[in-house]
């Protein structure tokens, strides 16, 4: 009986190890695709892929996090293309994924609060004049929470730099100050090490891109 139980336990451990290896492999592949997506359709497909992974790995927060990030990247691309009509829907879907991620990871996860900030900023851009006091305030609140939880996080520094860089000077923005903040963000990226190979590690190339514009 003891031999049987031991064999069963070893078999279960082997299956668990294989399942974990498969999860890490597919997540690594999907995360890498975030950097190569060029259309809203590709980002939507990627969000759907992460959602399916999350439905199978229901105890892990990262699939829902990356599903939300894919939706946000889709929204940022829509915004750059001047398509504001679907930003509300895109942001709402991102928030649903983030609610799932936060339920699994807890309320003190800076990466999730940063994405909540980014989703709120997208909603505000539908009508900045009308939504500054609601979605704009929410974005500021979430950014503050994220920074308090993890002040050395380079992605927080990156998003702060973007906000300053793209905000008109009459509203407190500054391209010069933005560039200084991009430098600070890059320094944080160079010192940063993610907790695991799957943890959020995006943003360095964006900081480098903005700084490369300064030399042109």
Image (tube, rainbow, N blue to C red):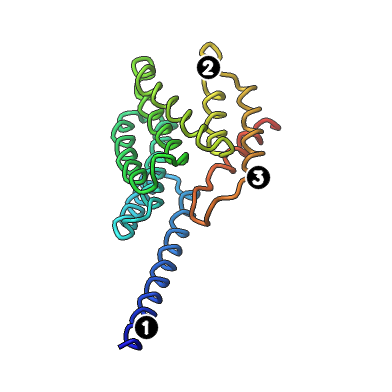
Task: Work out how far the residue at label 1 is from the one at label 2, CA to CA, in angstroms.
Answer: 67 Å
Q: Is residue 128 positioned above or below 28 on the image? A: above
How packed is label 2: few (under 14 Cα within 10 Å), some, or many (20 or more)? few
Taking the spot 41% from the left edge, 48% from the top edge, the residue there is: 66
Q: Which residue is mark 1?
A: 6
From the top left corner, tell me how far across and down residue 44 is, in percent.
34, 46
Q: Secondary structure at mark 3?
A: helix
Snapshot quadrant of residue 85: top left
Is tag 1's residue or tag 2's residue first in the polypeptide sequence?
1
Q: Label 3 neighbourhood size at 10 Å, few (<14), some (14-19), many (20+)?
A: few
The residue sitting at the right extreme is 215
Looking at marks 2 and 3 on the same chain, the residue that comes earlier in the sequence is marked by 2
Report the residue at 30% width, 60% height from top.
Answer: 56
The kind of secondary structure element at disc 1 is helix
The percent position of residue 101, horizontal first and vertical second, equals 36, 46
Q: Position of residue 139 (x, y in %)?
A: 42, 27
CA separation in Å, label 2 and label 3 = 31 Å
Q: Which quadrant, please, contains the N terminus?
A: bottom left
Dot in front, 1 or 2: 1
Q: Badge 1 local density, few (<14 within 10 Å), some, or many (20+)? A: few
Give the labeled residue for mark 3.
191
In the visual, does 27 lie left or right of 212?
Answer: left
Res. 180 mark = none
Which disc is residue 168 wearing? 2
Q: Position of residue 128 (x, y in %)?
A: 38, 19
């Amino acid at each position: 009986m003891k031999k049987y139980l031991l064999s069963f336990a070893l078999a279960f451990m082997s299956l668990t190890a294989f399942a974990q290896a498969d999860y890490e492999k597919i997540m690594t592949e999907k995360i890498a695709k975030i950097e190569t997506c060029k259309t809203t359709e590709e980002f939507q497909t990627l969000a759907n892929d992460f959602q399916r992974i999350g439905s199978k790995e229901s105890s892990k927060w990262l699939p829902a996090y990356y599903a939300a990030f894919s939706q946000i990247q889709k929204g940022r691309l829509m915004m750059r293309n001047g398509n504001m009509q679907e930003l509300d829907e895109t942001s709402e879907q991102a928030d649903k994924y983030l609610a799932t991620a936060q339920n699994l990871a807890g309320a003190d996860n800076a990466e999730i609060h940063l994405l909540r900030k980014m989703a709120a900023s997208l909603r505000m851009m539908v009508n900045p004049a009308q939504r500054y006091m609601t979605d704009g305030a929410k974005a500021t609140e979430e950014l503050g929470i994220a920074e308090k939880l993890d002040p050395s996080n380079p992605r927080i520094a990156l998003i702060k730099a973007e906000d300053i860089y793209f905000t008109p000077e009459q509203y407190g923005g500054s391209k010069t100050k933005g560039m200084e903040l991009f430098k600070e963000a890059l320094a944080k990226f160079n010192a940063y090490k993610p907790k695991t190979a799957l943890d959020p590690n995006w943003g360095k190339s964006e900081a480098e891109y903005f700084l490369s514009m300064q030399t042109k």
